[in-house]
Image: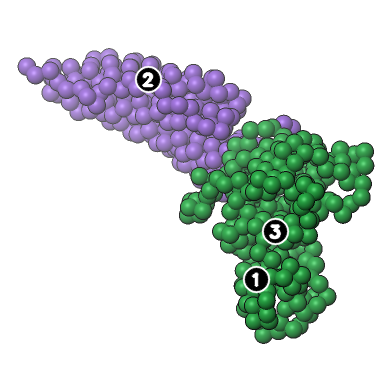
Amino acid sequence: MPETHIQTAFDRDLESIQATIMKMGGLVEAAITDAARALDERDETLADAVRANDKAIDDLETSVNEEAIRVIAMRQPTAVDLRTIVSVMKVSGNLERIGDYSKNIAKRATVLTQMSQIHDTSPAIRRMAQAVELMLQDALDAYIKRDPKLAEDVILRDAEVDQMYNALFRQFLTYMMEDPRNITGCMHLHFIAKNIERMGDHVTGIAEQVVYLVTGSLPADERPKADRTSFQKVAEE
Amino acid sequence: MDDMRITERHLDQKDIKIKADNVQVFYGSSHAIKDVSVEIQDKTVTAFIGPSGCGKSTFLRCLNRMNDTIDICRVEGQILLDGENIYDKKVDPVQLRAKVGMVFQKPNPFPKSIYDNVAYGPRIHGLARNKAELDEIVEKSLRRGAIWDEVKDRLDAPGTGLSGGQQQRLCIARAVATEPEVLLMDEPCSALDPIATAQVEELIDELREQYSVVIVTHSMQQAARVSQKTAFFHLGNLVEFGETGQIFTNPVDSRTESYITGRIG
């Protein structure tokens, strides 16, 4: 199939909307990394910057949706063009949510900075954030290259993030049982870990859109679900 | 589940009305239709799409033997209407065309009154025994053509005096007057404005309850709006035939995809 439309303006519309998605992706990747670094390095200024930058991500999401609606109204896209438009709308939603989670992490990092450090969990959280950030890089790469294999790989990797979250969940429980003074800090840390775990799910959502965009159907839901904390309870003494 | 529109799906059915097997059409030495096999369902709107010269109109005209009128045209293979070969020697093409009606690109009412335009077919086929019956057929047909209310007070006025959209609906009324089972439409809206087009499309939707409708259209959006099945023709080949929703969201063949997304003409 030829790459270009007979009406080249249609190609320009689709390219520009996808460029906006990539710009959003870049900002969101930075937000994840910076939020985790702000926590680990107890850097309040960086945390403030992450919170302030979320506005730009939200604005880009709005502009992606407006552009997508215009293309639908004015060009009546079909087949792969239609799937491109549907996927940019979904991907921008996923990116916006990841941005929100990063902002929330930054807020909690600010609170945690003002408290004494609880054991040494922030490097583990940072590693978890790094894993998600790499998944996001690959998901966006798969999107631009229209590479469903890479997308499938990203989907599988979400299980590792879930396992990291499971481990942290158990650790926080232990610390809270050890000393009730840890509860406030551990609650914040737990929400941070949960936020990152949810980011992984949104990255998976992006990867699924890549498969949909290329093949026309979503991947069969076979990915391992490794978040077991919903069934977890404290062993009774 | 063939209709894209959720509330229309109760109309879906799978009875085959027309079955074409390995149809080949030649104009002199030029091979216009290459080995086309297709099954057209009853009470379904089937759209034929494709670039100019792809053979969609030629194939449509095979379905009621309109190509017989062209001397150098030769049709091979077979086309079955309710299991009977329409190219069989026993078949009278005039009788066939009463069963398989046709509406053309440009509205072509006879230079007669509105009434006579519709009454012409029933008269020559002897469908009415007296004037009262004929009046009834004319009214019923004009109602089915969704034009009755606009012309009921001037049935004696010439059909050619109507607006383009009205003329086309008159031609549809004329086509349904002989109680056809299949209605072939060759770009029925290409000479109409958007409002008249919408009225004809609404009419096609209503006709689907009674007839098998086959429409050739250059407007892909029209095919998407009115049809349940879409066939894509390219260079005389039937490239892809499938449910309209599938053709427009996820076509199998890359040539279909290129055409409907505006990448080849």
Element carrying mark 1: helix
- Give amino acid for label 3: Lys
Q: Nearer the viewer, mark 3 or mark 2?
A: 3
Front residue (pair B147, B223): B147
Residue at left offset 57%, top offset 29%? A215
For chain A, give the colour: purple
Instruction: State the residue position of label 1.
Output: B141
Q: Position of residue B196 (x, y in %)?
A: 68, 67
- Give amino acid for label 2: Pro
Q: Residues within 10 Å of mark 2 (few under 14, many from 20)?
A: few
- Give amino acid for label 1: Ser
Q: Position of residue B109 (x, y in %)?
A: 79, 70
Q: How many marks?
A: 3
Question: Does any portion of residue B232 appear in the rendered image?
Answer: no
Q: Which mark is residue A223?
A: none
Residue at left offset 79%, top offset 63%? B106
- Do the residues bearing badges 3 and 2 touch, measured as CB atoms within 8 Å? no
Q: Residue furthest left?
A: A237
Element carrying mark 3: helix
Task: Pinpoint the chain carrying mark 2.
Answer: A
Instruction: State the residue position of label 3.
Output: B99
- The quadrant in which residue A63 appears is top right
Task: Pinpoint the chain carrying mark 3.
Answer: B
Task: Pinpoint the chain carrying mark 1.
Answer: B
Instruction: State the residue position of label 2.
Output: A224
